[in-house]
Amino acid sequence: EAGVTQSPTHLIKTRGQQATLRCSPISGHTSVYWYQQALGLGLQFLLWYDEGEERNRGNFPPRFSGRQFPNYSSELNVNALELEDSALYLCASSLLWDRGVPEQFFGPGTRLTVL
Amino acid sequence: ELKVEQNPLFLSMQEGKNYTIYCNYSTTSDRLYWYRQDPGKSLESLFVLLSNGAVKQEGRLMASLDTKARLSTLHITAAVHDLSATYFCAVAQQGGSEKLVFGKGTKLTVNP
């Protein structure tokens, strides 16, 4: 069974640009989560999507946004990039309680570097 | 607000020794997870603990959960070099939000 996939693996942008990160969940999983792992800040929850809807959002500014498509894949967009947005962005997918144990499985991540 | 604290943050062990990593959390939760991360890699799921008194074991790692004390432990038995990695605990906010709050991680180095 294929795991969570993310693209691109690495992304280099300059300040003020926009970045788009993509995630495909494990087949059958309807929930997708985004986390940011920045140096010194640990893993922080960004967004949760389920069935195409945004269900929860972490303490990040509105320039972090995303969406989930009908096939349950997801996109994370970061507008007006700042240097401190440089981080590893991890996507995870899971089932929900009514469909099984809600264990989050993580993808390999996209390393975003903002110059 | 749910807060998760892990200790120690850094752990250097000799092969063959035993040690325990602790994970404390501040509010009631119905789920706790342990993950492993190798340098430059993603998170690998180790254990899911769903109820008070839950104990799970895989190889040299054993995890337990005490929901009354809001404490989970990850016990390492007879450490080997391959266990060198960063270990995170993560707690789900109760109420079905599915948001995981992570500890800062414990960087484990096992020396020969």
Image (cartoon, coloured by chain):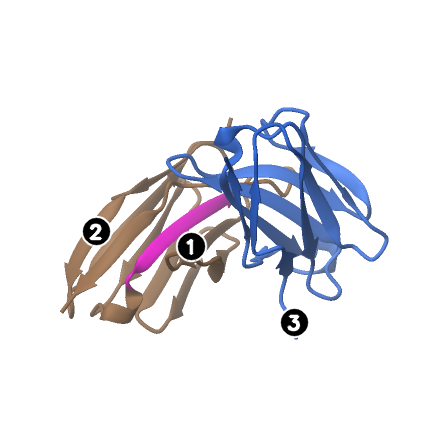
Q: Which mark, residue A2? A: 3
Q: Amino acid at mark 2?
A: Leu
Q: In the image, A93: left or right of B62?
A: right
Q: Is residue A91 visible?
A: yes
Q: Check the residue under mark 3 and report the chain it is in.
A: A
Q: Could you tell me which residue is drawn at 32 percent across and 59 percent down?
A: B85
Q: Check the residue under mark 1 and report the chain it is in.
A: B
Q: Mark 3 Cα within 10 Å, few/some/many (few <14, many 20+)?
A: few
Magenta region includes residue B85? yes
Q: Who is closer to the viewer here, B39 or B21?
A: B39
Report the residue marked by disc 2.
Answer: B11
Q: Residue A14: percent from the left, percent from the top?
A: 57, 34
Q: Magenta stretch? A: B84-91
Q: Check the residue under mark 2 and report the chain it is in.
A: B
Q: Mark 2 Cα within 10 Å, few/some/many (few <14, many 20+)?
A: some
- Structural distance between the alpha carbons of marks 1 and 3: 33 Å
